[in-house]
Image (cartoon, rainbow, N blue to C red):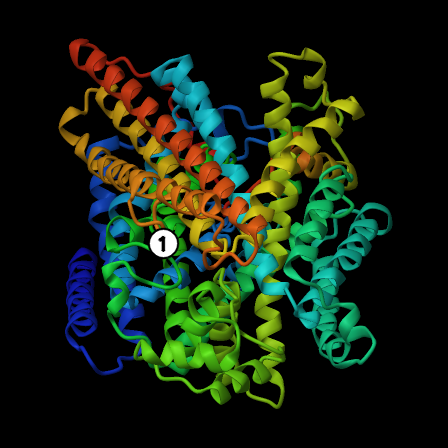
Amino acid sequence: MGTALVPIEYYRAHKRLWRRMVQAARLCCGVPDYDNYVRHMLEKHPDREVMSYPVFFRERQEARFGGGKGFRCC
Amino acid sequence: MKTMLGRLFFLLLSVAGAISLGVIALRRGEQINALWIVVAATSIFLVAYRCYARFIANKVMGLDGTRATPAVLNNDGLDYVPTNKHVLFGHHFAAIAGAGPLVGPVLAAQLGYLPSVLWLVVGAALAGAVQDFMILFISSRRNGRSLGELVREEMGPVAGVIALFGAFLIMIIILAVLAMVVVKALAASPWGMFTVVATMPIAILMGLYMRHVRPGRIGEVSLAGLVLLLLSIWAGGHVAADPVWGPAFTFTDVQITWMLIGYGFVASVLPVWLLLAPRDYLSTFLKIGTILALALGILFVMPELKMPALTQFADGSGPVWKGGIFPFLFITIACGAVSGFHALISSGTTPKLLANEQHARYIGYGGMLAESFVAIMALVAASIIEPGVYFAMNSPAAVVGSDVFGVAAQVSSWGFTITPEQLQAVAHDIGETSILARAGGAPTLAVGIAQILHSVLPGENMMAFWYHFAILFEALFILTAVDAGTRAGRFMLQDLLGNYVPALRRTDSWTANLIGTAGCVALWGYLLHQGVTDPFGGVQTLWPLFGISNQMLAGIALMLSTVVLFKMKRDRYAWVCMVPAAWLLVCTTAAGLIKIFDGDPAQGFLAQARRFRNGIDAGKILAPATTEGQMHQIVTNAYVNAGLTLLFLFVVLGILAYSVKAILAARRNPQRSDRETAYTVLDPQQIANL
């Protein structure tokens, strides 16, 4: 340890791990990362309207289970 | 230096695996520790992942990290999203892990743990994981297409229709057999029944909250739901002990069957956000949590295996299911070693989220190894309980009788000494009145899990709490599967019938939806009812049918992979898929033919029908039937099951014929003829920050 300062990345790694776990938990429920979606829309389709989180969530819920999808393994 | 260390690590791992396997195989007649199995499986899996999976990735498939995947090409932030590989692994694992790998090994434990361990390890490394990995690769190079579409594209439209029909049949069987697992677990169990019923208002509360109060807050609402679930388990104990409420929640298996059929019908027409989605969240998190808890529990408790390595039932005379090691061990284990259903996931959502082809090995091959590891843990849980208790729980009344004294005497006569008092003590410990005739795997597994968790967190009456926790955990995701499967089946049926009556295809029409739902529920409901009332005990017939169908779908997926390899002009590596495909074909065909034509009435459907028909003609009642109605029922069941098995054989042989045709055509053709999408170079910028 010595007197060296804790590098700043140390904290970032923490946050990143937590973020990944939240992403994985949400993806298991069929909801992909919302921030990533917003970033994608702003970058690639600035002309289109970005869904708010509640709308996005409902859209994903319908996409996962509607139309007979969402049946998972035995 | 790093590679040297890595090599040393894998060398040590191989040695550890070899030693553990040696201990498992050679120490006969004395109990061994469950850790030997865990260590053997882990080290073999890691070595297989490092060597065989890498060989498949580099030589057989030729994975190309510079090739843009569908997720990158069609990135829309919704369906197609390049995803961090660990996050995607979590998603993929949660999607493929279910009740199958938990139930199969428990039923297979009647042969002793050794055959199951060997097949789980070898089957996963050489067949199951190869299938998942290959289909993920094939689908990802074809814009994330589904298995049915892939078969149609590579083998022709007729083969595509046969594959879709096969998938529909399998789904009906799965729904029936899973529902039967729940029925067997909840019959005459007010505690279990109360907690399972309680999940519905809990899920609806969660659904309303997520819809109207704080939309999309999955984390907080799941946490609240979990607390309510644990409260309902605690309350269930009091309900069961109550003189009024206890009997009010006590139902026979036939009553529960009708409730489930009604439930399946209602739940699959409700809006998804109300019941299905919130319960799916609960079941997903509970499943992952319980699997992790079980793994930690086994490491921490280090239990001894009480089941012998090999029992006398390896000769095919077992009470839980009939048949010898070949082919029925492979049919019974099913999902934990190789599961056709994974091909539907590997060609469904996962390829649309794959950021880079190079991740496919970790997600496809690695994901299946993790699933197989779950099956190993289920086997451990079933093998640490007293073998006498295991056989008393899983043998049908037709074989061992239905009172504690008779069962204890019968099971003891097989060499698994157990007293009636011990059986009653176990029932008392887990808060039930009886543990007899609880076939289906879930209750046995729950007893094993309860023993492990109870050793970690002891406490008075906690054994009963953990038992009902484990039952709830299985019932929860089985009910979700029933609900989602009925929906999926309804759409398939509407699509199928829509060819003749176009109006039925309209999914916005209530009449069409209700007809589709009723048709689907009627199909699995019939099989479920047949299984539950079967005097032989339905697990004996339905589980082999399920195993045959599941392994058959895996055979189709592996035949497709073989065809694709030939079309890619990778002939000399085609054995990677051809060998497991051939093995699955041999197993499913042999099992199917034995189930139909075997001369032993306890095994072959036709012989059984003949025997009981002769009995009816002679005016006799043959055991296990007790009335003439049951005699007729046995005959009908036998014919229905023979017909289903014949259909499966037709599907698998049909696909085989089309595969051979496609392979011969590919070999004549000097050019590559597969339908891969064109190569597009990947801009590393597109998958930065993952």
Q: Quadrant of residue B559?
A: top left
In this rendered view, identify the residue nearer to me: B188 or B460.
B188
Q: Secondary structure at mark 1?
A: helix
Q: Residue at x 36, y 55 (%)?
A: B372
Residue B366 percent coordinates (x, y): 35, 50
On screen, residue B585 above or below B507 = below
- Subunit under mark 1: B
Number of residue marks: 1
Q: Residue at x 42, y 13 (%)?
A: B157
Residue B537 percent coordinates (x, y): 49, 57
User: What kind of residue is marked 1?
Assistant: Ile
On screen, residue B21 above or below B371 = below
Quadrant of the rendering where the N terminus of chain B is positioned:
bottom left
In this rendered view, identify the residue nearer to me: B615 or B505.
B615
Q: Residue furthest right?
A: B212
Query: What crowding class fits label 1: few (fewer than 14 Cα within 10 Å), some (14-19), or many (20 or more)?
Result: many
Residue B685 percent coordinates (x, y): 46, 32
> Could one spot residue B305 in this view of the protein?
no
Q: Residue at x 44, y 37 (%)?
A: B346
Q: Residue furthest front?
A: B618
On the picture, is B87 further left or further right than B672?
right
On the picture, is B499 further left or further right than B561?
right
On the picture, is B184 further left or further right than B32?
right
Q: Residue at x 41, y 80 (%)?
A: B300
Query: Which residue was labeled with disc 1?
Result: B333
Residue B244 percent coordinates (x, y): 83, 76
On screen, residue B256 above or below B84 = below
In this rendered view, identify the residue nearer to me: A36 or B475.
B475
